[in-house]
Image: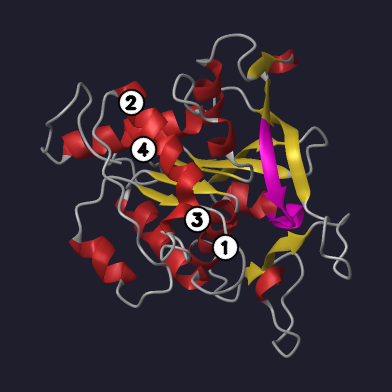
């Protein structure tokens, strides 16, 4: 679900990463592109037979509410979800609105000068990075490879740990896993809201080396019957698709497609490859 679906090449790296993971999991990929600004988005999700939801990156306010609504659908219906960059930020906005009960919560990127001020640390859940420069937008993004420390006993830690030594993960003290992924963003999750979100069940299992910048979020793993958990709800501030290769798929995309296959099998539609299903 994204805002640039009119030009499919906009998501070429996403589609290729899905294909890499589909090959590795022996699945037949069927990717459906849905416009996040379309009024028919939610009916399409409700009426369609989708086994996973991916919300990629993007800029600007158009289509944000569609992304937020789609993420709520995936969270409540326990459909596997993977968010990337703005997709992670939209997941934080959705959780704050729906679970913490703050309907005005949003990103400061989308607030116009004439709009009512957001409650600091409560509704401004995504903020402009402190080191950024709003007056000079060119060349001011947080770009390139950055290190993320993954907490032990998290789903994301387990997915990256499956890689061979030297192919993207290095073990640190206290069981933390150090991974290097590429970034491209100006806004980030407001660290002031993190304690409340974690107390409400949204876990930030990946952070930068300072511990102040949120990099990966998850809901606790669990089956359909466990009301407080989710089979696969993961989002990352970085872009894992940029380092995916046919012979070395991204761990997050692998985990996402495996979860989509399980969802398909749960619905009784197993066919095709070894794990069956579509992403």
Q: Is residue 221 visible?
A: no
Category of crowding for the residue at label 4, using alpha-carbon neighbours closer than 10 angstroms: few (below 14), some (14–19), many (at least 20): many
Category of crowding for the residue at label 3, using alpha-carbon neighbours closer than 10 angstroms: few (below 14), some (14–19), many (at least 20): some
Q: Quadrant of residue 187?
A: bottom right
Say which residue appears at 68% left-offset and 51% top-offset.
Answer: 194
Q: Earlier in the sequence, mark 4 or mark 1?
A: 1
* Vertical relation: 274 (above or below) 132: above
**Residue 34 on the magenta span:** no
- Name the magenta segment's main secondary structure: strand
Q: CA distance from mark 1 to mark 3?
A: 24 Å
Which secondary structure, mark 2? helix
Q: Which mark is residue 36?
A: none
**Circle 3 is placed at which residue position?**
10
Category of crowding for the residue at label 1, using alpha-carbon neighbours closer than 10 angstroms: few (below 14), some (14–19), many (at least 20): many
Estimate the x, y position of residue 206 in percent, counting from the top left.
65, 35
**Circle 4 is placed at which residue position?**
231
Badge nearest the viewer, 2 or 3:
3
Are discs 4 and 2 less than 8 Å apart at CB?
Answer: no
Q: Earlier in the sequence, mark 2 or mark 3?
A: 3
* Vertical relation: 66 (above or below) 202: below
In the rendered image, the residue lying farthest to the top is 165
Q: Earlier in the sequence, mark 3 or mark 4?
A: 3
Q: Which mark is residue 23?
A: 2
In this rendered view, identify the residue nearer to me: 272 or 86.
272
Are discs 3 and 4 less than 8 Å apart at CB?
Answer: no
Are discs 2 and 3 less than 8 Å apart at CB?
Answer: no
**Circle 1 is placed at which residue position?**
93
Say which residue appears at 23% left-offset and 63% top-offset.
Answer: 46
* Vertical relation: 148 (above or below) 99: above
Estimate the x, y position of residue 253 in percent, counting from the top left.
44, 34
Estimate the x, y position of residue 71 in percent, counting from the top left.
43, 58
């Amino acid at each position: 679900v994204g805002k640039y679906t009119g030009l499919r090449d906009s998501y070429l790296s996403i589609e290729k990463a899905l294909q890499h993971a589909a090959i590795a999991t022996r699945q037949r990929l069927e990717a459906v592109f849905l416009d996040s600004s379309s009024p028919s988005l939610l009916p399409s999700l409700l009426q369609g037979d989708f086994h996973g939801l991916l919300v990629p990156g993007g800029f600007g306010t158009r289509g944000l509410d569609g992304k937020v609504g789609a993420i709520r659908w995936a969270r409540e219906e326990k459909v596997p979800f993977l968010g990337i960059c703005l997709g992670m930020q939209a997941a934080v906005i959705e959780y704050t609105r729906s679970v913490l009960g703050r309907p005005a919560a949003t990103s400061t990127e989308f607030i116009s000068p004439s709009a009512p001020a957001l409650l600091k640390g409560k509704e401004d859940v995504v903020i402009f990075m402190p080191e950024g420069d709003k007056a000079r937008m060119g060349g001011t993004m947080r770009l390139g490879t950055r290190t993320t420390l993954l907490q032990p006993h998290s789903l994301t830690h387990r997915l990256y740990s499956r890689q061979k030594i030297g192919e993207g993960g290095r073990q640190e003290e206290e069981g933390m896993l150090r991974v290097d992924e590429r970034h491209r963003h100006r806004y980030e999750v407001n660290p002031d809201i993190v304690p409340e979100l974690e107390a409400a069940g949204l876990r930030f299992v990946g952070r930068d080396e300072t511990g102040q910048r949120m990099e990966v979020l998850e809901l606790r793993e669990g089956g359909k019957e466990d009301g407080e958990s989710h089979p696969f709800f993961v989002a990352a501030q970085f872009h894992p698709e940029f380092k995916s290769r046919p012979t070395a798929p991204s761990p997050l995309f692998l985990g996402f497609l495996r979860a989509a296959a399980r969802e398909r099998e749960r619905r009784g539609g197993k066919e095709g490859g070894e794990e069956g299903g579509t992403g």
